[in-house]
Image (cartoon, rainbow, N blue to C red):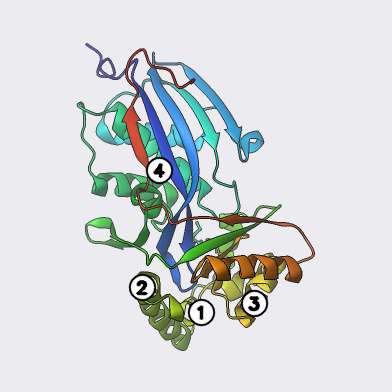
Amino acid sequence: MGATTPVIGRTVEVRVPATSANLGPGFDTLGLALSMYDELEVTAREPGVLEIEVSGSGADEIARDATNLVVRSIAHVFADAGIPLPGIRLVAVNGVPHGRGLGSSGAAVAAGVLAAQGLLAGVVELDDAALLRLATELEGHPDNVAPALFGGLTIAWTGERGPQHKKLLVHRGVSPLVLVPGYTMSTKAARSLQPPQVPSEDAVFNVSRSALLIAALTQSPDVLLDATDDRLHQGYRAPAMPETSRLVQALRAEGYAAVVSGAGPSVLVLCDGPGSRLEAARLADEITDTPWEHRSVAVDVRGGTVRERAEGSSSQS
Ligand code: HSE
């Protein structure tokens, strides 16, 4: 009996949230799951089959072959488990803005890893640590994939036992606003602007703000402005996204805790209530002369989910 036999014919449904990484000072470490979702249905088919349907954000740019990031992530988990890869049918409806610093690649990786976990259930069991390890191997850094997998606010780090995470629940007063421009920014290009070394006073500055940010997001939203200050990445990357940088600075000058979301170009504003979120959105409209889409979102506390679709049921309602 071929090792893929038990999984062929299985269909799983996966849902993964958007994420905002860094949150100002927490470069490559902090991440927040947000209530915008990619929804996928993955079926294990006979070996050799590859069918991909994508709609929603970025659908035109997404690969429909074996280089598709969700498919590569599924393949990575099967290879790691030593199980031959079955054929794949993938239907994805993407609600996470693509290429905008809201974790679209982390969501694709998390979706692939979760789909593989669901397809392999009862054959190979994957715990949270394995999911984070596999996802980080694909993504390169854990700050998006940790909240995409586990939800909430995550602190992620890589130690002797590989990538680890701690999930925290965010204070209910924190009201995130995401401002999304009409253009994309490549994470690779943003990372190429990072210097190999930083002044020690800047490192100390970010250590203090990151520590404060955990308190601000979990207990004391009143200190969010100071807590979201950064000297380790946003300044170096500003020349590549001047409009983003201008908007962040202008909102901060008015007292709003605005940061570059991930590697940009979106802006995340961590407001201390729905009223100040409305004010921040109004101010953003006044400051900018190009259109920015406003998304008032919640913190997703659940993270990515996977469930097997019962035989005979259909995703069509
Ligand atoms: N921490 C990452 C960066 C997030 O800023 O480069 C983007 O993937």
Identify which residue, 292 or 191, lies in the foreground: 292
Q: Amino acid at mark 2?
A: Ile
Residue 12 is left or right of residue 270, and the answer is left
Q: Amino acid at mark 3?
A: Gln
Q: Marks 4 and 1, Cα distance to the nearest angstrom? A: 31 Å
Q: Which mark is residue 214?
A: 2
Q: Label 1, on which residue?
A: 225
Mark 2 crowdedness (10 Å alpha carbons): few <14, some 14-19, many ≥20: many
**Which residue is painted at 39% across and 29% down in the image?**
13
Q: Marks 2 and 3, Cα distance to the nearest angstrom? A: 22 Å
Q: Marks 2 and 4, Cα distance to the nearest angstrom? A: 24 Å
Residue 83 is left or right of residue 42, and the answer is left
SS type, badge 1: helix
Mark nearer the viewer, 1 or 3: 1
Give the mark nearer the N terminus: 4 vs 1.
4
Q: Amino acid at mark 1?
A: Leu
SS type, badge 3: helix
* Residue most extreme to the bottom: 201
**Whole-percent x and y of residue 317?**
48, 21
**Whole-percent x and y of residue 223?**
44, 81
- Quadrant in the picture for residue 81: top left
**Whole-percent x and y of residue 67?**
52, 33
Q: Is residue 78 visible?
A: no
Q: Label 3, on which residue?
A: 249
Q: Amino acid at mark 4?
A: Ala
Q: Label 4, on which residue?
A: 110
